[in-house]
Amino acid sequence: MMDRFLRNNTVVKILSAVLAILLWMIVHQSEDTGTQSGLTAQPQQQLEKNVVVLYDEQNYYLVKTPKVTLTLRGSYLDIMNAVAQGDAIKAVADASKLGVGVHEVPVYVHGAPAGVSIESASVQIELEAVENREFPVELRMEGKPGEGMVAGEALLSPKTVIVTGAKSALNSVDQVIATISLDEAKEAIQTSVPLKAVNKDGDPVEGVRLSRDRAEVNIPIVKPSKSVPLRLQFKGDLAPGFAVQEVKQSGTVTIFGTADALAEIDSYPAPVIDLAGMNKTTKLTLKLAEVEGVTDVQPAEVQVEVVVVAAAKRTFDDIEVKVTGLKEGESYNILGTSNRVSVTVEGAKNKLDALTAQDINAFLDLTNQPGGESEMRVQVNTPNFVKTLEVTPATMKLEIQK
C-alpha cells in the first residue's frame, strides 16, 4: 500500500513542497540568529592597573599611588593577547603642574595593542609638600658570634641620613636602622646592609626616601679582651744610702680569655723585680707570663725603668700605736708609757715630702699572744719605697686580760 502511495505523482509533489518549505525555514532561522548575534556588544575585559603619576618629586610627595580599572574591548583573541601582555599597558596621570592638595586627574593609556580599545576614568591624586629631616643610623646586631668570640666596636658609614617625605610620613619615622647578623661569626664582618626608616613598632614607614639606601659596616670579631693596669712586684733592698724615686712603665696591658675569667682580673702581675744592691737608675725588660684563665697578653714584654736617687731621712713624732689580733672577750692595757711613738723613715726626697703621719701605720700584733704581761716590738708599715729606720720606743709593755 505504501508503494502505491509513493508512486502517486501528486503525493510526491506535495511532499517535495513541504520539505522545501521546511528547509527554507531552517535557513532563514539561522540567518536571523546570526543577525541577532551581530547586534550583541563586543567582548570586553576589565584590567586593574596602578597609575603612573607624573609629578614634581623634588618638592611634592604622592600620598598614595592610585589604581584605575581599565575596560578593554575587541575580539576575544585580541583581548586575551592584551591581558597576557598587561605589563606593556601603562595608565598615566599627569600631575606635573599641580601643587599641594587633592586633584581629579584624567588617566591616559599607553601601550594598547592593535585591535583593542581601552576606556579609562579619572583618579584622585593627593600631593603633600616634601620635607627633609636628618636621622642617626642605628645599627642592630642580631645573633651571637662563634663560641669564645665577641663583637668589637662597630664602624658604621654613614652615621646619619636625610629622610625625605611628606610631613605626615616623617612624623611616623622613629629611627633609621641597619640590621646585621653576627650568628656564629668567627672573623671580622665587612659588608653593606640596607637602611630602613621604621616607626616605633619597628615597622617600615612607607612613602619616604633616604639619602642613602645602604650603609657600610665593619665589625671586628675577636676573643674577649680587657685592659688592666700592670701590677709590679719588688723584693730586696737597694744599696745603703739609695732610694727609689719612681718606677716608669707602660701603664696597662690587654689580656684575652673567657669573659668569666677576665671579670675576675683587675690587674696583671709582672715578674718580681729584685732591687737588692741597686745603686743607680736601671732599665729592665719584663716578659709577661700567662695566668690562669688568660690565653694571651699584649704586649708580651714591657719596659720598666727604676729611677734610683740618694736617700733622704725624715722623722714623724706622735704616731699612734694601734693594736691588732685581739681575741673576742680580751682587753689590754699599755703599761708605763703612752701608746705613741716617733718613727724615722728613709726614701727619695719627693716621696718623703709627700708623706704624712696618716701614711705611717704603727701597731702591736697580739695574734697568738698569751694572757698576762708582755713586752712587744712596735711594727710599722709604710708606703712603697719608704723604709723604716728607727722607732722610738722600739717596744712597749702591755697586759692582756682574758
Image (cartoon, grey):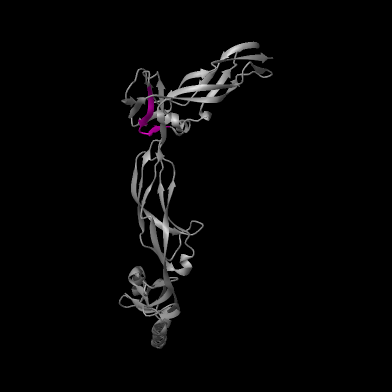
Q: Compared to 313, does 64 lie above or below?
A: below
Give the residue displayed 39% in from the left and 42% down from the top.
152
x and y, in percent, of residue 223 in the image: 39, 35
Q: Quadrant of the N terminus?
A: bottom left
Q: Quadrant of residue 227?
A: top left
From the viewer's perspective, tell me whether residue 72 is left or right of residue 374: left
Q: How many marks?
A: 0
x and y, in percent, of residue 380 in the image: 52, 21
From the viewer's perspective, tell me whether residue 111 is left or right of residue 263: left
Q: Compared to 215, does 304 lie above or below?
A: above
Q: Nearer the viewer, residue 90 or 315?
A: 315
Q: Compared to 217, does 300 lie above or below?
A: above
Q: Compared to 70, does 258 lie above or below?
A: above
- Is 215 magenta? The answer is no
Q: Nearer the viewer, residue 292 or 172?
A: 292
Give the residue displayed 66% in from the left and 14% down from the top.
400
- Is 252 magenta? The answer is yes
Q: Main secondary structure of the magenta part?
A: strand
x and y, in percent, of residue 53 in the image: 38, 74
Does residue 288 appear in this view?
no
Q: Nearer the viewer, residue 387 or 301?
A: 387
x and y, in percent, of residue 182 in the image: 40, 44
From the viewer's perspective, tell me whether residue 136 is left or right of residue 377: left
Does residue 198 appear in this view?
yes
Q: Quadrant of residue 59?
A: bottom left
Give the residue displayed 44% in from the left and 80% down from the top.
104
Q: Nearer the viewer, residue 52 or 394?
A: 394
Give the magenta-colored segment's residue range.
242-257
Q: Quadrant of the C terminus?
A: top right
